[in-house]
Every structure is written in structure tokens, then in C-alpha cells.
Amino acid sequence: MKSKSLLGIAIALFFLAACKKDSPVIEPPTTPIEKPDPLELLKDSVSYIIDGKLRVQRKSENRSNSLRNAVANVKLDSLVKQKEYTSGDKDSVMFGRGFLFEDEERNGIEISFLKKYNKNQAQQQANQGIFFIPRDKLDLLSVGERKFAMDFTRNNSQSGIVFELQGDYYGFQTHGYSSLVYHQLLKPELQNGSKFEITNLQKLKSGKYILEAKFNASVYWGDGTHIKKIENGYIRIKINPDNLYF
């Protein structure tokens, strides 16, 4: 009986081995490695021509880019002992997002996107004191043309774009000085022929956006003198709406 039992086991093992040879091993499907989106790898940068020289600059990693809040629709109330007393629109805020670009010689440009918001269109940041961020961050950066906010730091009534140059061209900008008494409001004719247009705002797989814009502009001292032309400008930046500083 014992030999018959062993023989049965041997026969069963033989057939099991035969089945294994006839049945191919099924490997789990391999997931193809997804190639990174080349747009995600692009560096933030700006290029433009000034005084006939091409400038190519990258977004500064050493100095933080700026968020701005300012009183909107500022007006002069009084002047006492050469000190200006002003007031503004309590229901509105001028919000700005600045991007600083520099080269190896620390020559650079800060480009700020500004928009006046009613405070019910913004949310106050709990850890930032009395600081307002627009609820729809992409609204600030939507595709289309922008004017230059020439009364920035002064009346703060104009939404638009501000340029402030660094390094060799420090002091050149697209807006005027802040005083409402001692400097006149700049005339819009200074920016005749200027243009800033956001041409692309494209969502990437990561949830970030890539923004592209082209521009030309006049820059000058805050009193509108010593005018220089910026031509053939192009800017590319990535935007992260989930980040406070986007």
C-alpha cells in the first residue's frame, strides 16, 4: 500500500511539472516611464534690447520676488511743513506681483504686474498682517494687453505693468516719483508706441502655468527725463497658483 501511495504522489508531481512547462509565466505589465514635460524644465527668463545691446537675464534665486500691497486711489489731503498727508480708497487695494531677473553682473529688471482690487475680491492673509491676495490669482495674469501703471507709488489708480531697472540702469523705470506735491504726474505720451502683451498662459501637467509675454517700453527717471527705449522684449515665467507667492 505504501508503494502505491508513493507512486501516486510521483505521478501527481509529474503532471504538475508538465502543466508548469506548458503554462507561460505571466509578468505584471510594466508602466512606461513618463518623460518629463520639456516646458517644466524651462528656466524663467527675460530678454530685451536697450541702448542697442541685448540683455538676457534669469529670475533671481538669491533675492525673493515681491508681493505688493498699496493704498489705492491716493489723494493729497494737506501739506504741513513740507510733509504730505494723504488718504485713499478704504474699500480697495492695489496688489502687485514682482519678478526680478538678473545677470551675472547683477544688472537686471523687476517686472511687476499690478491690479486694483475691491477688498471683497481678495482674501486677507492670516500670517501676513493686513495683507490682501486676490482670490483668483490667474486673473492678474490673464492673456491680453496691459498698459503701464505710470502713477504707481503715487496715486495708485492705474492697473498695469511696472518696470524697475537694476545695476547699470538703476533709477530707470516706467512710473514716476511718489510725491504728489513736488513732482508732476507723468504724461501718458511718454509711453507712446509702448506695448506689453501676455501672449500665452498655458497649464502644465504639474498644475503650474507657463506665462509668456512680449513688450517694448520707455524707461526714464521718475521725473520723466533721460528717456531710454526697451525693444524686442520677451519674458517667460512659471506660475504656481497653489503657492502664496505664485
Image (cartoon, helix red, strand yellow):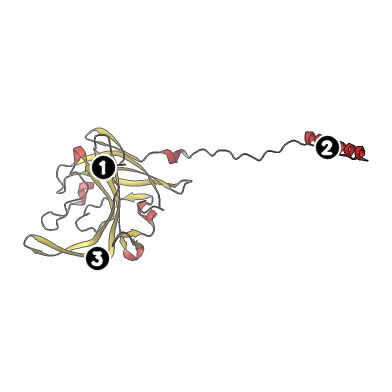
Return the disc, 1 or 2, that comes first in the chain's sequence.
Answer: 2
Nearer to the camera, 197 or 128:
128
Residue 16 x %, y %: 82, 38
How many badges with numbers are in the image? Answer: 3
Return the disc, 3 or 1, that comes first in the chain's sequence.
Answer: 3
Mark 3 burial class by Cα count in 10 Å: few <14, some 14-19, many 20+: some
Badge 2 amino acid: Leu
From the viewer's perspective, is 213 left or right of 39? left
Which of label 3 and label 2 is nearer to you?
Answer: 2
Circle 2 is placed at which residue position? 13
- Could you tell me which residue is drawn at 35 percent across and 63 percent down? 121
Residue 53 x %, y %: 24, 32
- Could you tell me which residue is drawn at 20 percent across and 39 percent down? 167
Kindly report the distance in space between the C-alpha atoms of the residues bearing marks 1 and 2: 79 Å
Kindly report the distance in space between the C-alpha atoms of the residues bearing marks 3 and 1: 30 Å
Badge 1 amino acid: Ile
Write down the quadrant of residue 127 in the picture: bottom left
Write down the quadrant of residue 107 in the picture: top left
- Could you tell me which residue is drawn at 35 percent across and 54 percent down? 140
Q: Are marks 1 and 2 in contact (CB under 8 Å)?
A: no
Residue 177 x %, y %: 16, 52
Badge 3 amino acid: Asp
Q: Which mark is residue 109?
A: 1
- Could you tell me which residue is drawn at 60 percent across and 40 percent down? 31
Q: Which mark is residue 89?
A: 3
Residue positioned most to the left: 81
> What secondary structure is marked by label 2?
helix
Regarding residue 201, the answer to whether it shows in the image is no
> What secondary structure is marked by label 1?
strand
